[in-house]
Image (tube, coloured by chain):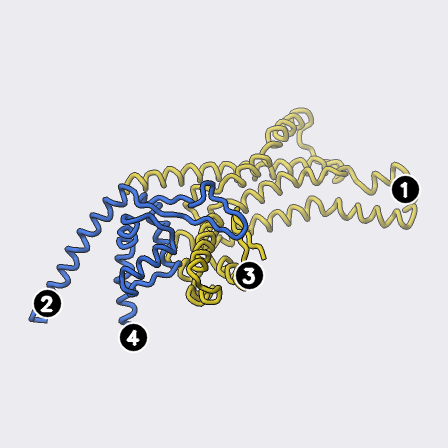
Chain colours: A blue, B yellow
Amino acid sequence: MPGEERFARQLKKGVLEMLVLRLLAAQPAHGYALIVRLRAASGGQLDLKEGTLYPILYRLEEEGCITSTWDSPDGRAGVGKVPRRVYTVTDAGRAALAQQTEIWRQFAACVEQVLGRDDG
Amino acid sequence: MKWKIGRTTLDVLPPVKRYMHAIERRLHADRQTRVRIMTELAGDFQSRREAGQRDEEIMAELGTPEEVAAQFNEALGGEGARPASRWRWAFVVLAVLVAAAVLGPDLVTLLAARQAESIGIIGGADGPTAIYVAAGPAAGFSPLVFLPWLLGCAAGFLLPTWRDPNACQGYAPSLLLSGLGLLPLPVLALLFAAISVADGFHVGDWVSSLPLLLGLSAYCGALLSGIVFCRALYTRRRNRKNAGQGAEKK
């Protein structure tokens, strides 16, 4: 249903930055590896598209939460080989992740509390 | 088939190349962001190939070029999706108008002279007189008059603020071109000052005042370059200052 889809999309939008930071905090990765890891970690529920992931990565990089380097030393590659950008979380990114995780836990507990009330 | 993205050359099949080009064409972002996105997509393509996926499967999974580009454009939002203002074309129109006004008479006389050459002697004017009649007093001078205009208009057209009013980068081409266009300004200003002191600006017949008008036109072109140069410098400084303040607030 369109309403359900929109709801799921909005929820996903709000937490993606935090999830991407969490995955990168565990291990540096390039874009496609992040997509695969997120899909596996969420049991296939979170299947990100490149068009959604990369703008998030660019934004996080601009905010100083992550850095990126080419996987080849000079950013060049020969014919048939493409350099890939490997993203790594920074100290500021780890601090932001800790803060966001805390906010999320409080928020989720609050939502659960409201949903679990008997007076509906 | 080779496909070049930025500094990288990738060996791809024609359908993949067409697919990637179709995405690139639909991206509403500056060149730097477009190159980065396309390089990352090409990297993903390679990763998926290494994971055993066929090109057709990869393209189907990513979505149509319209869908992929739309996702990027939506996610990049106001930062990259802004198309360049149409007002920048005013500089092109101005350049064309000035070219017609400055170069037009020269071209007409040149064509007339060629035609006369093919016919022979016109109205008894031959030898040096014919050359003077054909070329006029501004012979070979008009392209030099047009150059400051051309540089100023090109610099104005290339200003990065047409795409992003808060742009902090991309001013180099505008500054370089307008800087070059600005060079004749002091010389022309001195020349006009000297003429006005010596003779005063009395305009006689049309032919004798033509060099003065052309000089004035070159002066205006250099002035335009100067305005664009100052505008580019000022805007770059202001935007960098604002960006710095924004970063501090964060």
Q: Distance between the residues labelled 2 and 4?
A: 25 Å
Residue assigned mark 3: B13
Q: Please give the chain letter of the residue carrying mark 1.
A: B
- Decide which of tag 1 and tag 3 comes sooner along the chain: 3
The disc label shown at residue B78, or none = none
Q: Position of residue A6 (x, y in %)?
A: 29, 68
The disc label shown at residue A116, or none = 2
Badge 1 and badge 3 both on one subunit: yes
Q: Which of B6 and B234 is in front in this view?
A: B6
Q: Position of residue B202 (x, y in %)?
A: 69, 33
Q: Which of A8 and B229 is in front in this view?
A: A8
Q: Where is residue A48 in the image (x, y as percent from the top left)?
A: 34, 61
**Residue furthest to the left:** A118
The crowding category of the residue bearing disc 1, from other C-alpha atoms within 10 Å (few below 14, some 14 to 19, many at least 20), is some
The crowding category of the residue bearing disc 4, from other C-alpha atoms within 10 Å (few below 14, some 14 to 19, many at least 20), is few
Which quadrant of the rendered structure holds the C terminus of chain A? bottom left
Disc 4 on helix, strand or loop?
loop
Badge 4 and badge 3 both on one subunit: no
Of badges 1 and 4, nearer the viewer stands 4
Q: Inspect the image, locate mark 2, and give the three-letter code of the amino acid beneath it.
A: Gly
Seen in the image, is A79 located left or right of residue B53? Answer: right
Of badges 4 and 3, nearer the viewer stands 3
Residue assigned mark 4: A1
Q: Inspect the image, locate mark 4, and give the three-letter code of the amino acid beneath it.
A: Met
Q: How far apart are marks 1 and 3 (CA)?
A: 67 Å
Q: Nearer the viewer, residue B129 or B244?
A: B244
Of badges 1 and 3, nearer the viewer stands 3
Q: Nearer the viewer, residue A83 or B169?
A: A83
The crowding category of the residue bearing disc 2, from other C-alpha atoms within 10 Å (few below 14, some 14 to 19, many at least 20), is few
The answer to whether residue B77 is seen in the rendering is no
